[in-house]
Image (cartoon, rainbow, N blue to C red):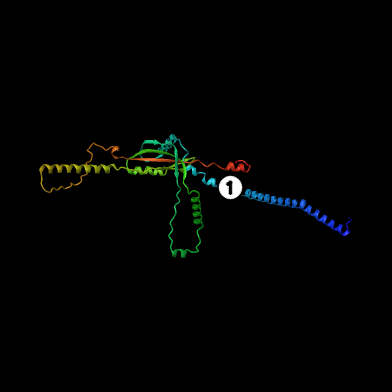
Amino acid sequence: MRLSKQERIGVLIILAVVIIGLGIFLFIVPAAQTIGTSLENRQNKENEYNAAVEKANKRGPLKDQILEEYKEGEHLADMFFSEMKSYEADAALREFLAQCETNVLVTSLEVSPPGTATLSPNFPTESEVTYDLKQYATQGAEVDEAVANRLMRISQLATALGTSQTIGASTVSFSVKAKNIEDLMKFVDEINNYVKTENGVEIRKALMLTSGISIEYKDIQTKYDEYVSELNEQAEEAGRAALLAGIDGEFTYEVPERTEPEEPEEGEELTIEDTYVECGMTLTFYSIERMQNPQAQLDAQDGGTAA
């Protein structure tokens, strides 16, 4: 069967359409998909590159910021002691006592094994008085930038350090004898203001009195004991006299006037045992590890060497 000219043209057109369709599905569509995937990968790589460049640009300022923060807190650990064994805590206490100027006697020394202690930060806040007239008067007023920055810094510190921290601690207990209450209080002040020179720099050390102070006023107690003893003796004498006399009816007894204790006889001197005050105390030496200098690690990340 022979096809007419028009039929042959139609068949050729159909074949061309089929070939074009097959070409599109077999070549163009996969190529387009490949191109789309390549463009997406290219965009991802560009994003990664831009992020890397941005990170690299921040490395210098970030490094400087880290070093600046380290320099600011470099000597904070100097306020604390290094972790100490029991004998080292004993030596640290003796070193403290050696520089004390107060005339006291320390006895009954007992050193506890090294352990830990929990410190909680305290951020004092100033109360502000507010009322309607004050708010109206100050509305729109400029805020002091220094005050605002200080409050912001305190807020940031409170957020970062708002939880309690556990650090090392060595505890030493002992008994202190002093000539009077004033000397004992001076000794407590020396504990609170302990400054030690290290590497030519005076540093306030983290030494704390962690026990209460209980003081016995011996002179007052002695006077009252003598007065009570004298009253008891006089009461017993009056009662015995009334009983022996066989007095019927009401009996009255006048409390004698208080008499001052007799002064020591000539040649009899009071000793330190009669006048000193004694108090038990517990001191705690706080310790933390010193922060490592990040310079070498930062230089290594930059591919350089520490200066």
Q: Nearer the viewer, residue 203 or 68?
A: 68
Near mark 1 (Cα within 10 A), the count class, few <14, some 14-19 or many ≥20, is some
Q: Nearer the viewer, residue 148 or 160?
A: 160
Q: Nearer the viewer, residue 71 or 38?
A: 38
Q: Nearer the viewer, residue 284 or 75?
A: 284
Question: Horizontally, is 179 left or right of 72 in the view?
Answer: left
Residue 41 screen position, x and y as percent: 69, 50
Q: Residue at x 54, y 47 (%)?
A: 69
For residue 16, which quarter of the picture? bottom right
Q: Residue at x 42, y 41 (%)?
A: 284
Q: Residue at x 49, y 44 (%)?
A: 76
For residue 175, which quarter of the picture? top left
Residue 154 screen position, x and y as percent: 49, 52
Residue 294 screen position, x and y as percent: 56, 43
Q: Is residue 4 above or below residue 115?
A: below
The residue carrying mark 1 is: 64
Q: Quadrant of the N terminus?
A: bottom right
Residue 240 screen position, x and y as percent: 14, 42
As helix, strand or loop, the secondary structure at mark 1 comes to helix
Question: Horizontally, is 4 left or right of 206 in the view?
Answer: right
Q: Quadrant of the C terminus?
A: top right
Residue found at the very far top of the displayed protein: 87
Identity, as a three-letter code, of the amino acid under mark 1: Asp
Q: How many marks?
A: 1
Q: Is residue 127 above or below residue 211?
A: below
Residue found at the very far front of the displayed protein: 1
